Amino acid sequence: MADEIRSIPRIRREHLIIVIDSNILIGNYAFNSRDMENLLDLTQKTSSYIYMHEIVIEEVRAHIVNKCSEHIEKIIKNSKELEKWGDVKIPPIDKDKLIKTSLEKFERLVSLPDGVSIGTPDGGVSKEPSAFPVIIVGKIILAPLDASDLDEVLMRLIKRIAPCSRNGEEFRDAMIWLNMLRFCKKRFDGSPVAFISADKHFSDGNKQLKPELLEDVRKYGIDLEYFESLPEFLEKYSEPIKGIDRDWINSRIDFERVNELIKSKDILKMFNYYNNLGQEIELEEDAWTIKLKAFYLIRKESSLEVNLTFEVDIKNVADIKKDNKNNVSDIRFEVSGNIIDNKISINESTYSIRWNEI
């Protein structure tokens, strides 16, 4: 994951925000399961972000501490038994050091910067602004607890409104849910959201959100899709693009032909260098359409350089449909590169994929 920390951008409609609850992350916190590998592969290939709430991160950290402590106690107990049976001395185990190492590993994986505190000292919720900043690192968004929803959460606990239980419990579920809706509306307005949670307090028992929660989604005007498991989400969003990589793209887009078109149309002169770098120029071929979008220009004494994004529409996706991925109707790539004196170059490490569904 990238180690550059920058302020979170206003994400465009084409991005997918993947919200992971703690019950999903706890079983995959080391990011080394097949499902997590597929999720990370999806975010790298597409314009997707993984959203983690402050409470979720704190719950995973607590789980790591508890599990480490449990296993270490078992090891210490077994070591003492072993010493009774043999003439051997088992080296002492530094419990605190092992727990600290495990926590640091998790925090590196989610790109949590050094010195960032999570939660209040007593584990409660304060109405003061969270010390935990909004951070985006690579494809992971770390979102702080927003105390603005505290009054609404308390009201839901009293009135037993979902995701709170009939016993007036599930404070953390309500806080995560309302914070997520508020945050997505404010930061990602117009972007689709995938909410992944195995918590029964969100589900109506038929793989749908409870009616009260659907009303929340409608009120906030968010395009939200609910999944009860990570494999369920991956089946829909990861499976259609498995096997698509740089070689797959190069086999379908003749960038030499793109270069010829750029030269023949004198693309550089078509861009308005001073006033409208966001304009689009479209190149059409039988198998694909490419839209060139300039985002900055460098003018040198002997040359002109335009840095671009290339939005590529693949018109024929029949070979993907052969793999029983019939929900794919259109595939679009975004790669970045530049044009220097009418010669195109592509950044090999940067591309993303979007697709439409039938």
Image: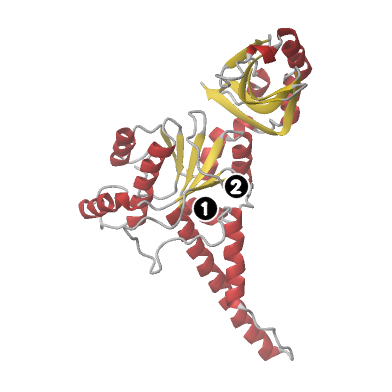
Residue kind at label 1, given as amino acid type:
Leu
Q: Indicate the secondary structure of the residue bearing disc 2.
A: helix
Residue 14, x across and y down, in percent: 51, 28
Residue placed under numbered mark 1 in the picture: 25
Residue, far left: 159
Q: Give me the residue at 39% from left, 64% from top.
A: 120
Q: Which labelled disc corresponds to residue 36?
A: 2
Question: Residue drawn 37% across and 41% down?
Answer: 181
- Residue 205 appears anywhere in the view: no
Looking at the picture, tell me which residue is in the foreground, 156 or 80. 156
Q: Which mark, by number, is residue 339? A: none
Point out residue 336 in the picture as x, y percentages from the top left corner. Answer: 67, 28
Quadrant of residue 277 in the image?
top right
Residue lying at the far front in this picture: please name it: 301
> Is the residue marked by circle 1 packed among few (<14), some (14-19), or many (20+) residues within 10 Å?
many
Q: Which one is earlier in the sequence, the residue at label 1 or at label 2?
A: 1
